[in-house]
Image: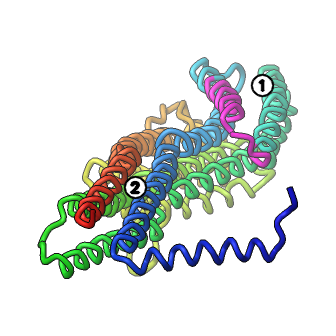
Amino acid sequence: MAAKTPASLRTAWAEAADRIRAASSTEPGRLRIIGAALVTLILAFGAVTAWQIAERSSAAQSVTSSSEPLSVDAAEIYRSLADANTTEAGGFLAGGVEPSAVRRRYQNDINTAAQLIAEAAANSQGSSAGQNQMQLLGNQLPVYNGLVETARADNRQGLPLGGAYLRYANEQMSGTLLPAAQKLYQLQTGRLRQDYSSAESLPWGTWALGALVLGALVWAQRRTYRRTHRVFNPGMLAGTVAVGVLLLWLVVAHTVAREDLADSWDHGAKSMQVLNQARIDSLQARGNENLTLVARGTDTSYEDSYQQEMATLDGPRSGTAPGGLLAQALSLADDSAGRSPVQAAVDDVVQWRSRHDVANRADTAGDYDTAVADVIGGTDTSGMRVTAASGQSFDSVDSSLQRAITHEGIEFQQASGDGRKALTGLSVGAAVLALLGAAGSVLGIGRRLSEYR
């Protein structure tokens, strides 16, 4: 058979156009064209609605069950590493064999970090940047732990070299491990924000298509009324109701889901990010407070870093000066249960600063034993038992922040879960209502066509 030439193809298109023009010259032909157009529009509306809602529902599910938990785990990796570093520095100040409670806390932190790194690697979904940071953490954590063990062994023997090893371990932590953990946290937080953006994006195209379909159905019924003087066409009326219900459901469900997700961000995810950062800064401040004494006056940078981190941590300040992370956390807390632990942390920070100043004055005056007792507890140079050490204030700050994070986590789960539920069933409902709308339109047009037989 000979291949069709461009001329024959143009003839075929021309013939098809002629048939359409011929059909549109009669009322039955016009009704068939209108019916086909309505069915196509209704089914397209249902398909696009199901597709776009499925995408947003999947993103909302990821916010709740994937990206936010991974972001929390990344923050916990950072916190565990920072706490291990801080705890070991405090144990080092005790001299000799460190207390068993300090040893357990350090080991728990290292084990927690190692476990979460392994879990994050298994759930990173192929992110090369995330995998690089986790590989770095996995490789360097044993190196840090080895340095700490060497420092601990030297310290038991009373060797000054132990302090140098501990400072080297701290450099390994602050220069390699914590920056990698921070990068991992930023990557997971970025993924969380992308999922929020996808879940909250407005389906303008679907809304516009729904309005177009509804307008076409109203026009078709008005046209039928003008030609027959019959107020209702049951089939097309049913199709209009089905499309109207779907459009209303789409607008209401997505609006509710968007508001719930926005609430879960403002009063859950965002609050937890601020609180996690505050907890991390408090751990770093505590570590630098301990290392100031470990250095025995040979390095003043630890005291400078302590002051900077405490300034970042601060609560509300007088006048127009902005507060630090705790001030932000207070402003984000939307109920008394959320504000109470944050306010407790603010008060504990004030107490911590006061106790640190006492220890710092003793250290500056050369009274090392008293300074150590003021920081970690114990007996000062005069043999008096120190019962108000700065370490107690730090522990109170850390405990209060953990309570606040737990509360915000519950609020996040509830609000994000409500947002996800608002979209439940809409994809399936869109398909069902579109089929009903199309069927109604076909029946309505078929009823009119039967009048011409």
Q: What's drawn in magenta, residue-wise?
A: 108-130
Say which quadrant the N terminus sits in.
bottom right
Residue at 84% across, 33% down: 139
Residue at 51% across, 50% down: 59
**Depth order, front residue of 62/37:** 37
| Residue 195 at x, y percent in the picture | 55, 53
Look at label 2 and name its amino acid: Leu
In front: label 1 or label 2:
2
Is residue 110 located in the magenta-colored stretch of the structure?
yes
| Residue 232 at x, y percent in the picture | 14, 68
Q: Which residue is under mark 1?
A: 152
**Depth order, front residue of 229/369:** 229
**Depth order, front residue of 353/88:** 88
Please determine whether, in this image, residue 368 is positioned above or below residue 272.
above
Please determine whether, in this image, residue 264 is positioned above or below residue 70.
below
Residue 412 can be seen, yes or no: no
Per the rendering, the mark at residue 353 is none
